[in-house]
Image (cartoon, rainbow, N blue to C red):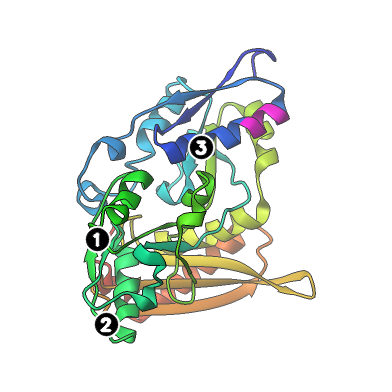
Amino acid sequence: MNGTNTPLRLGTRRSQLAMAQSGQVAEAVRRITGRPVELVEITTFGDVSRAALAQIGGTGVFVTALRDALIAGEIDFAVHSLKDLPTAQPEELNLAAVPVREDPRDVLVARDGLRFEDLPDGARVGTGSPRRMAQLNAWARDLGKAIEMVPIRGNIDTRLGFVAKGELDAVVLAAAGLTRIGRIGEATQHLEPDTVLPAPGQGALAIECATTNAPLAAALAELDDPHTRAAVTAERSLLAALEAGCSAPVGALADLLVDEQTVTEMRLRGVVGTTDGSTLVQLSTTGPVPASQDDALALGRELATEMLGKGAAGLMGERAL
């Protein structure tokens, strides 16, 4: 780590959300290391392409440029939204820390303060996520309503603007993103996981550095939260075992079950569905609190095997992205 006054270079995407979450990590790293941290803004393919994620091969489009900069030594570490990471970890890079997770749920931001149940027939709801489309269409069917899912891309301001300008009745976003930029108050409803499961790893951050930089990895590891890491490991193991990319209609959430303030088990829930909501495979499993990453991986594979046995493979459309 080359001297205490040499700035550490933190690679980040340029979006408001990425800069906000990277700034929070930078401040934590400054406290731990006593060294200045400078943000290095990097444009990824996902930032410049306006095509739907499924069309451009959603996996890795927001992280590849950052990882290339790390491997080339142009930055010292990088911060990603963990849900954007491919499930395969490159040997050259160390997932040094997964900090405490923010709220993993999705939220609705609707006109007139509406909740999803209150949206009128034919309401236009914006999201670029096949996972959200599948579950929201299924929910609308259960409510006896028809909604129109409108594919959208863009940053948070752009998406919220669709509602503010009256172009859409509502949009669906990650609670974590709105929280990190101080705008969670604009959400009109938090969507509970019993109805809409989030993306695997949603709400969590990933901090990567080169595997050759052991001193920095050790410092960054102080930001790691073992419970969050175990949960997202199980979720991403499910995603990997389903051979699905991050733009496939797969939701997953692992949470710790607590009995009298003692963590007793981990529950993993998963869903795969057709984007029209006509068919969903939803299952869950529980296991002991993972004592190791291998335990968390096994829990994800176990649930994936059950879901595949129920026909999940035929519902995903985009596979092995």
Question: Of all residues shown, which one is farthest toward the front?
Answer: 112
Mark in the foreground, 2 or 3 = 2
For label 2, the residue is 145
At mark 3, the secondary structure is helix
For label 3, the residue is 20
Q: Residues within 10 Å of mark 2 (few under 14, many from 20)?
A: some
At mark 2, the secondary structure is loop
Q: What residue range appears in magenta? A: 27-31
* Dominant secondary structure, magenta: helix
For badge 2, the amino acid type reads Lys
Q: Residue, x 22% and y 51% (percent of image)?
A: 52
5 left or right, relative to 49? right
Image position of 277 with respect to 2: above or below: below
Q: Earlier in the sequence, mark 1 or mark 2?
A: 2
Image position of 9 with respect to 312: above or below: above
Q: Which mark is residue 318?
A: 1
Q: Quadrant of the N terminus?
A: top right
Q: Which mark is residue 110?
A: none
Q: Earlier in the sequence, mark 3 or mark 1?
A: 3
For badge 1, the amino acid type reads Glu
The span from disc 2 to disc 3 (Cα, nearest Å) is 38 Å
Place residue 293 in its image quadrant: bottom right
Q: Residues within 10 Å of mark 1 (few under 14, many from 20)?
A: many
The span from disc 1 to disc 2 (Cα, nearest Å) is 27 Å
- Examine the rendering and report whether any part of residue 49 can be seen: yes
**30 falls in the magenta region:** yes
Could you say where residue 43 lies in the image, as x and y percent from the top left? 34, 30
At mark 1, the secondary structure is loop
